[in-house]
Amino acid sequence: MKIRTVVPAVGALAATLLLAGCGSDGQGVAAPSSAPKAADYGCLPQDRADKGSFGLDSVAKRDAYYQDSDAGRAKVAVVFSHENGDTLCDWIPFVEDFTKAGYATLAYTSAGDLPLDIEAAAKYLKAKGVERVVLVGASKGGTGSLAAAAVPGTLPVAAVVTLSAPTYFGSWNGVEAIARIKAPLFVAAQENDQPFAENAAELAKAATAPVKELKIYQGSSHGARLLPQGTAKADLLAFLAKNAPSS
């Protein structure tokens, strides 16, 4: 397992993120930020919202956004799960980085039933011709992604990515879940974002997957806000290209 510390380029953060609100997890529960408007999710140009927005059939209808790869008809899709109190808008600034790399993408706003929502996303994607999924989760979304990947689902899991995931969230035991996952694992946090950096190390230690990578970066940013800093996004895309390629 490879551990690397890098220095983030923090100046790009404010210009890159166009979020509807920035929740904060911790081991407890933060008050949710204001929900985006259903028509445009608060973070999408209207033409993109009109083209890709839909209601995901889970335990209830979930606001969701789907975008195919630039080449179309992607066989591997990335399912993005947001942190506590936030929305699918966490991921909109990064969708096109993944579609340019050949992946379809699906981001959704969850009310807390992440494993069920991820399974609903897999069913939707299978109908689109997708054959495998990559689960990417921020904070609570990372722990929920581990819980979802630890049990058989509609589509095989090609890789799991956690950004600032707690070891436990509600009924989800990330340590137990990650020990059962055989798909490649990318576990990341920033060193001054505690207890999540320690949680990342604990999760990586418990992992039994043949391929696993732990990244502890400098800084104190949380969840999806890691991606535009330093080499985090490039590291993640390189990991997926090698271990869960889009074709």
Image (tube, helix red, strand yellow):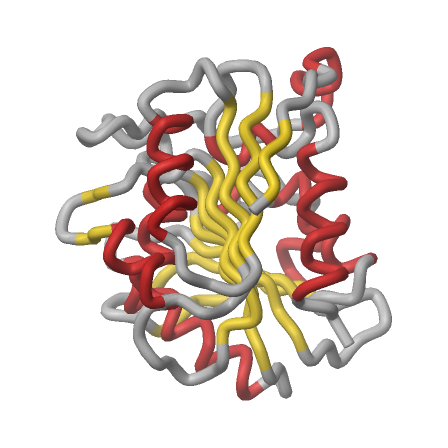
Q: 38 or 151, which lies in front?
A: 151
Residue occupying the point 50% across, 44% down: 187
Q: Position of residue 149 (x, y in %)?
A: 38, 67
Farthest residue, direction left: 171
Q: 47 or 171, which lies in front?
A: 171
Q: Position of residue 24 (x, y in %)?
A: 34, 25
Residue occupying the point 54% across, 28% down: 216
- Please determine whether, in this image, residue 233 is positioned above or below residue 245: above
- Please determine whether, in this image, residue 125 is positioned above or below residue 52: below
Residue 140 appears in which quarter of the rendering?
top left
- Residue 24 can be seen, yes or no: yes
Count of labels in the image: 0
Q: Could you tell whether 83 is left or right of 229 in the image?
A: left
Residue occupying the point 52% across, 56% down: 185
**Quarter of the figure that contains the C terminus:** bottom right
Farthest residue, direction right: 71
- Please determine whether, in this image, residue 8 is positioned above or below residue 48: above
Residue occupying the point 31% across, 37% down: 166
Q: Could you tell whether 122 is left or right of 243 in the image?
A: left
Q: 65 or 162, which lies in front?
A: 162
- Residue 37 can be seen, yes or no: no
Q: Position of residue 236 (x, y in %)?
A: 67, 46
Q: Could you tell whether 124 is left or right of 231 in the image?
A: left
